[in-house]
Image (spheres, grey):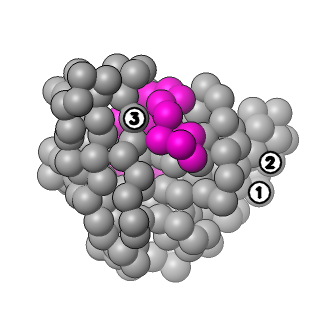
Amino acid sequence: MPLPLSADDMRRFIPVGLLLSALALAACSPAGGQKADAQVTIHLVSSGGLQVPVSVEIAADNKSQERGLMGRESLKPDEGMLFTFPDNRRLGFWMKNTLIPLDILFFKDTGEFVSMTTMQPCTTPVCPPYFSEGSAKFALEVPAGFIARHQVERDWKLALGQW
């Protein structure tokens, strides 16, 4: 779930975040099977030209971004969710009610790599945030192990297509 707040804002607004996440969770189906509006294939491209296709759901609006991958029990190895934002900014995500570990990769509007990390599931009332190391426009969530399996490095790019 994206948190377009700074780390300081995050610390000040955790109680509001808990309330908002409870409301978002109540609006979701019990099975957590809702999906984003669009699905496309994107490519991650290494500096050597290696391309890794990823089938993604697009989370471009507040509702799909708030829901994210909450409640999902599994993802196929090369599928995920691409969060898109209007501009480059420092992005923050948390794993509230997310059942599976995820790798997250952040990219600028140009497709340039920003940072990546692995996020752990969280079912407790307060979950730690995961922030991009710099400004990013896109966040790609994929199953944990994706980064290692494809040997994703800092020189990789997100191939921006039409969606």
The quadrant of the image that shows the C terminus is: bottom left
Which-is-in-front pick, marks 3 and 1? 3
Q: Identify whether 51 is placed above or below 70.
A: above
In this picture, which residue range is highlighted in magenta? 91-116
Q: Quadrant of residue 8?
A: top right
Q: In this view of the protein, can residue 101 be seen by the observer?
A: no
- Give x and y (percent) for residue 42: 30, 53
Three-letter code, disc 1: Val
**CA distance separating discs 3 and 2:** 33 Å
User: Is residue 106 located in the magenta-colored stretch of the structure?
Assistant: yes
Q: Marks 1 and 2: in contact by CB < 8 Å?
A: yes
- Give x and y (percent) for residue 13: 80, 48
Q: Label 3 belongs to which residue? A: 157
**CA distance separating discs 3 and 1:** 35 Å
Secondary structure type for disc 1: helix
- Mark 2 residue crowding within 10 angstroms, few (<14) / some (14–19) / many (20+): few
32 with respect to 28 (left or right): left
**CA distance separating discs 2 and 1:** 5 Å
135 with respect to 40 (left or right): right
Q: Label 2 belongs to which residue? A: 13
- Mark 3 residue crowding within 10 angstroms, few (<14) / some (14–19) / many (20+): many
Q: How many marks?
A: 3
Q: Which mark is residue 99?
A: none
Q: Identify whether 139 is placed above or below 57.
A: above
Q: Identify whether 38 is placed above or below 50.
A: below
Q: Label 1 belongs to which residue? A: 16
Q: In this view of the protein, can residue 149 be seen by the observer?
A: yes
User: Is residue 3 located in the magenta-colored stretch of the structure?
Assistant: no
Secondary structure type for disc 2: helix
Three-letter code, disc 3: Lys
